Amino acid sequence: MKKEFKKNVGDKVWVMYNNRPLSCQISAINYGEFISSISFELEKFERYTVKFDDEYVDQFELKDIYDTKEDLIKSL
């Protein structure tokens, strides 16, 4: 089974980094599933690694990634 993601490696996106909007590119997607030791339910995680000027920036959840600067500013 192939996992489909809303964003793809290579997509240009906007994130907030160090209290400022930053245009960057998705360089990797980390996805996993595990059983929670507290609730004993299946938990899933999806993190997007982004780079700016070929330098690693950070990992973000999908809710923190925007297609345009305008969308990012509207979310504030």
Image: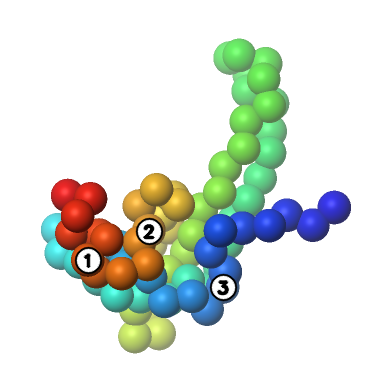
Circle 1 sits on which residue? 70
Circle 3 sits on which residue? 9
Residue 22 vertical placement versus 58 (above, below): below
Q: Can you tell which quarter of the image residue 45 is in?
A: top right
Query: SS of the residue at dot 3?
Result: loop
| Residue beneath the point at 24% across and 69% down | 69
Let me know if residue 25 appears in the view. Answer: yes
Q: CB of mark 1 within 8 Å of CB of mark 2?
A: no
Q: Residue furthest bottom?
A: 53
Using a 10 Å C-alpha cutoff, classify the residue at mark 3 as few (fewer than 14 neighbours), some (14 to 19) or many (20 or more).
Answer: some
Q: CB of mark 3 within 8 Å of CB of mark 2?
A: no
Query: SS of the residue at dot 1?
Result: helix
For marks 1 and 2 on the same chain, the one whose residue lies earlier in the sequence: 2
Under mark 1, the amino acid is Glu
Q: CA distance from mark 3 to mark 1?
A: 22 Å
Q: Can you tell which quarter of the image residue 15 is in?
A: bottom left
Using a 10 Å C-alpha cutoff, classify the residue at mark 2 as few (fewer than 14 neighbours), some (14 to 19) or many (20 or more).
Answer: many
Name the side, left or right, on which 9 lies relative to 76.
Answer: right
Which percent across, then down, holds residue 23? 29, 75
For marks 3 and 2 on the same chain, the one whose residue lies earlier in the sequence: 3
State the scheme by which the image is colored: rainbow
Name the side, left or right, on which 7 lies relative to 36.
Answer: left
Circle 2 sits on which residue? 65
Q: CA distance from mark 3 to mark 2?
A: 13 Å
Under mark 3, the amino acid is Val
Using a 10 Å C-alpha cutoff, classify the residue at mark 1 as few (fewer than 14 neighbours), some (14 to 19) or many (20 or more).
Answer: few
Q: CB of mark 3 within 8 Å of CB of mark 1?
A: no
